[in-house]
Image (cartoon, rainbow, N blue to C red):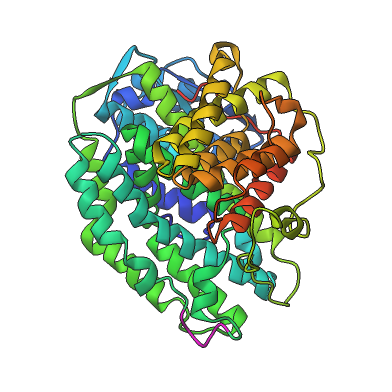
Amino acid sequence: MTQPLCIGIGAFNKSLSAMYSQTLLGYAIGDRLKPDVAVIFADDMVHITYALWEVSLPLDWVRRYPVIEQLLSRHISPREALANPIAEPLVVLLGAQGCFAPELKDSYTLREIKALFDPMRSQWYSEYYAHPAWQRLRSGQASRNGLLAWLIHNYHVSRAAGVVAARMAAIGGNTPWASFFRQDALDEYWHCDAYYSLDTPLLKCVSAEEIKGYVPLPASLAFEEHTLQVAETDPIAHLLIAYFQESSIAFEEDSRIFYYAVEQQYGVQGLFNPWKQHIQIDVDQGHADGLAKLLESDVKVASTTLEKSLRQVWLAYYFLRCGLDDILSQDNGNQIALRMPIRAPCSVSNLWDLLIVHLEDAAIPRLLTDSELAQLHHGITNSAFRALSFSRQHDEVITCGRWAQKLSRTQPNLASIPEANPWCMAIINHLQEAACKPTTWLLLVSLLAERAPGLRLSGEWGAGLLRLLSGEDLASDSATKLSQMDELLSRYMICSDKVPSNLL
């Protein structure tokens, strides 16, 4: 899992230099600096800025070596610069930071994919660890409730690790990596209990059972369900997500410093001892190295396939980063506010009345575009067939089958639909994961149709659908699932981000 820490850019550069010095490959460097890499010659320094990075070099040193000046002035390529040993450290550093555009090809070996992904990974790390949540925790500015939300978010990420690996091993396809992820599932599933369960008197007034029952924050849920879906459908993306998470072990020393600072600020000395034990396991067992070795292969992947996989990896990173936003949303005072499941007993007849106090505004606060509606319709249709595949009772089979039939008649063509909103994908993943309980799936789609009338699903949903289910017993978590769907919808409505169309 991604190590929860906050480090300085200087320390990060040092860590990256060590990380990449042994993996410099020509095809990873590419032929040019990216257009949005700014190189500014000012006074006695040269400043190289990209994303959240800035590298400053003495101007007299740059002038002393023409190869350096020509590289930064874009007069020669990084490949040409590597012919001079004096340029290699700078090329390695800039390559690690993602400053060079990769060479575009029709297909890539797994080795080449790793070399392409490593700079991308470093850029994402820099953005992730620059989030203000880290400084609030390090300085003790975050409230107790914010601290608790961060701790439990990490528990949820740990709890998902073994489950996601098991999903890939069980139904993610017959890949050469299946045996690796079977063992990975066995290695990971118990860590949430042994190291991240937070069963400690240091967290006053919060029991171990309350930690287990805490309803995941929207982004925590989105990350878990996205990685579960990826594990089923995209082995390349699954491997790269795992590699991204485990590679954060490179910042082991920084994480220990961060844990110490948090313990001192909040008076919880020893709280992170189990987390540090877990770090040591990752170091001793070389999890990141094991994943890297799976990529040391000449097996080729088409560029179109790789592009789709990279978008899936970006989504996982995006939801992890949004998890920090959610943690800040819980940083609202020292009064502990636990996100517990909706416990009240419910039936179909009283479900909506029960939910009214948990839902957001009664209708979606903005109109969905035609492309957004088409994307949702497509996802709902796919999940309808999944729900039908899990149906066992007569009424479930007939009801889910009818809706799969109706939805597929008006299945939109996605060829012309632009990049999806990440939270649209989270909603679709939520439906896919809920489909194993068809009654819950029907209720979720009912809520979606009620809250997004522009969806124009054929047939009657809402009250009419509930009448079809009047004889069904609701799953105990149905009300909570609906409330979670409402949270995902709310995030969707306020988010203007898009999944990148081109990451190569």
Judge whether residue 82 can be spotted in this image: no
Q: Which residues are magenta?
A: 199-203
Q: Position of residue 387 (x, y in %)?
A: 46, 38
Front position in the image: 406 or 121: 406
Residue 244 percent location from the top left of the image: 39, 45
Instruction: Locate residue 234 relative to residue 219 in the image: left or right.
Output: left
Where the N terminus falls, by quadrant? bottom left
Q: Is 99 contained in the magenta span? A: no
- Figure disc tally: 0
- Residue 207 falls left or right of residue 330: left
Residue 347 position (above or below residue 224)? below
In which image quadrant can residue 309 be found? top left
Mostly what secondary structure, the magenta segment?
loop
Residue 211 location (% of width, % of height): 52, 73
Compared to residue 9, the image places residue 122 above or below, namely above
* 181, 449: nearer the viewer: 449
Residue shown at 66% from the left, 65% from the top: 136
Residue 259 to residue 36: above or below: below
Horizontal and vertical percent for residue 189?
Answer: 32, 61
Q: Is residue 202 magenta?
A: yes
Residue found at x 48% / y 80%: 271
Q: Is residue 185 left or right of residue 93?
A: left
Give the camera-side residue of 129 and 14: 129
